[in-house]
Image (spheres, grey):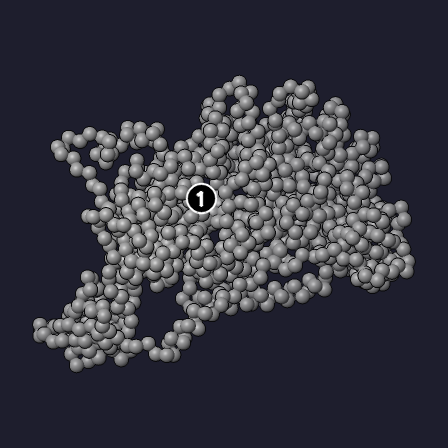
Amino acid sequence: MRKLFLLLFFLSLSTLKAQDYFPTDKGVKTTKNEVVAFTNATIHVTPNQVLKKGTLLIKNGKVVDVGKSVRIPSGTQIIDLTGKSIYPSFIDIYSDFGIKKPKRQSGGFGGTQYAAEREGYYWNDHIRPETNPINEFKFDVGKAKGYLNAGFGVVNTHLHDGIIRGNGLLIALNPNKTNSYRVLDDMSAQYLSFSKSNKSKQLYPGSRMGAMALLRQVYYDADWYAKGNMKNKDLALEALNKKNNLVQIFETDNHLDALRADKVGDEFGIQYTIVGSGDEYERINDIKATNAKFIIPINFQMAYDVSNPLLAKHISLRDMRKWNQEPSNLSVLSKNGVTFALTTHKLKSITAFHKNLQKAITYGLDKKTALAALTTIPASIIGNNTIGNLNAGSHANFIITSGDVFDTKTTIYENWVQGDQNIINIMNITDITGNYNLSVNNKTYQLTVSGKGAKQIGSIKLNDKKVKSKFSFKYDWITITMNDNGNFTRILGKVDANSNTIQGNAFDSLGNKTTWTATKKSKTKNSKKKGKKSKDTPVTVLPVSYPNVGFGNYTLPKTQTILIKNTTVWTSESDGILENTDVLLKDGKIAKIGKNLRDRRATVIDGTGKHLTAGIVDEHTHIGASAINEWAQNSSAEVTIEDVVDPNDINIYRNLSGGTTSAQILHGSANPIGGRSAIIKLKWGENADNMIYKNTPKFIKFALGENVKQSRSPNGVRFPQTRMGVEQVFVDYFTRAKEYDALKKSGKPFRKDLEMETLSEILNKERFISCHSYVQSEINMLMKVAERFNFNINTFTHILEGYKVADKMAKHGVGGSTFSDWWAYKYEVNDAIPFNAAIMHNAGVTVAINSDDREMSRRLNQEAAKTVKYGGVSELEAWKMVTINPAKLLHIDDKVGSIKVGKDADVVLWSHHPMSIYAKAEKTIIEGKVFFDRAKDIKKRQAIKEEKSKLINMMLKEKMGGGKTQVPVKRGDRNFHCDTLEELKS
């Protein structure tokens, strides 16, 4: 803090007179030493300690004492708050108050900045832990007023820019003081996010998984630097190490990112405090398992305008549900024991804060929990026990209200910050709201007064016809100017708080003086009954499914004992196709295969006339991921798709409907050395971790050809730009990896490099390459590079010129995962032929048919059939190309890919011959759990219609009741594959 004061001294000489230890040249100096006692109030010392008719004593900006029997010193100013309440002022610990976010630099995909611009700092410009916002902080009086009006007394602010953003400032919202008094802590927290800095055009990272990999590398480098192993000075790493003992606050955009952030933190022993997004209820068990404290915004979305049915049909069920379910988020978090603070972050206007909070309370949030989330919890997160409570010694930050602070009718009168009074509404204004009979000039009008405090307003009617009038209520005096068909009347009268009658003098347009009387109407029993019914009407919150989209599961499938009787079994093994055979699935495994099998506990399925196969394995897909390409460097071996598996992707369910049970989600083809892959089972409804194979084989995506040399990118300048350059990239990186691996094995100290770690695994034959390929010359080139470094390529994917080099592929031992009949969609596939798969198969290559496309991946059974037509491959061998062959290429054939006793119970029951265009997957089973059932699917479709109809009616009711609505926006469905620009940029 001393450094802060010195800095402010030089920055703001004009404020010297405010410092109590600076000399004065104005003669005799008098120090203000005011003691104030607030008596007879309901005082919320903390959310758990409430005093009735208590006294709060403050002095010099601090709480001196609080209780029922407080000794009040002589000369104390006493303020009687009979009938009123005192609460600690609220705290917002995630704000950008007083700190302007920099504008985004031009650049992006196709831009040219690959290296960092700053010297003496970390190699990536988006890592900025040295940022100290005190240099840019400027107290915003206007914004402070909005906070004060909403009951906030303290904000924790920082520069919202970058992946590691630097420290925060804890600011008292006191417009009457200088920054040297307002700044409670100039090193309050360290801030992080997955978003890049607007101050830099550096392209890397270009994806969520790239940001995660970068964070990991930063932590490893900071540790290496702290141990004195780096030769150079790095100001960013020095700052990071100095601030690693601060609270680490991580901003996220959705619950998946919250889980991803927590994953990175856990790897390095860091427990982040996570800024959530309001959708935590969708995966509450996973959120709870993070053990993190959360900071939750309450920016509930508006209902959709569904009055136009043509537009309404484009709204997804998930978006509709979000409007309905989102207000229950805080209640769900609380009931599940998740500690959270509240923030105004993401609110367009702070005036909506109380309205949204009251809505959350209506949806089940406990008021005591709400108060804690605004006071004691944010104070504990930030580690400051002098705010958020009214204990002796704490800052005198408190609000005075007319009653329960969370009641819609409550008025916030004053907000005291550091012992300084801020008047929000004049405290002792009489409440005159209600309906009156106004008698003046021998006529009786209907006067209605509404509003709060000084903002009470009136309107006048005569026989249900509105009369033009101007109403004013100040200092308990009413003035009304009324224009009744050109006859003006001016009314003046004083309010008696203890009377239901207001009276005074009136003057007509000629100045004649008369009297007037306004008598308050008593509420009828019917109106009371109606009001009570409205208040007690419970809200309807629709249940959450997993995932929380159409076709989601309300309960996750459970492992069953299933006996499938008298069916045709395609084993994908040497046993071939077995007619009239039974298969028993038990404990998640294939238990028995034979005839006349029995199990008393089994659910029996009649398979007569049907076909049972192993679940389809897709060796190359891009479904089920939030990002596909880390495109900003020519090597991204440090990233992994496992970080960004998206269990909410509807294409997972669609793939199940087509019999696919396992898939490799590959990195894209934007760079020669891509990222690591994720091999998953399509367990619809499970979280990402439960989808990923346990002890999964290690794979990485490489790429050749037009994509990596940026042939179709008009601004591409990154190396390599030629096919020769692509080869050189591989040689250079493997040479470096060989040197790295040798140093690592030597036992000498080494800097852990995630990129080199991955490439070393390839050299040590611990990680396998699946390579995007087309042209025979490049296919030959990569096999030679691999042989030069003593390893084999595992799989060439696409491999549309594989038929030209099938003999060399067989000799090398590489498999081919190809399309059945894609060709001519770009220059380098001009020589593709539909006989490719058959020719490679006949040459002894292990061949698989893959999708690389969300649509094709749900009909790979038909793609396999094409190899029978093109090349005369047998039906059984063709079927192996989508089952056991891709399983072999992925090194998971010991678990899946065929129907064999002891393997995982991943099977599909088809209505017809599995390669027929008439075949439908009736049941898709993974580990003995039914994840797709066609009969249930039909019921789900009807349920979706009924639920959307219910939500549409609720939204129409919201609109008809005067609620705000938003225009529906049609969202596109992502279709990632290796040769779309969309996929390259993702």
Question: What residue is drawn where x is 65% and y is 51%?
Answer: 686
Residue 753 appears at what percent x and percent y? 61, 27
Foreground pick, 318 / 79: 79
Image quarter for residue 581?
bottom right
Q: Which residue is mark 1?
A: 380
Give the side of residue 951 with respect to residue 758, left or right: left
Question: What residue is drawn where x is 19% and y is 76%?
Answer: 517
Quadrant placement of the N terminus: top left
Residue 525 appears at what percent x and percent y? 37, 79
Foreground pick, 696 / 885: 696
Give the side of residue 364 with respect to residue 34, left or right: right
Quadrant placement of the C terminus: top right
Image quarter for residue 476?
bottom left
Foreground pick, 980 / 944: 944
Question: What residue is drawn where x is 76% and y is 27%?
Answer: 791
Q: Residue furthest bottom?
A: 442
Q: Is residue 418 visible?
A: no
Q: Is residue 122 above or below residue 571?
A: above
Foreground pick, 881 / 597: 597
Image quarter for residue 760?
top right
Residue 888 appears at what percent x and percent y? 79, 40
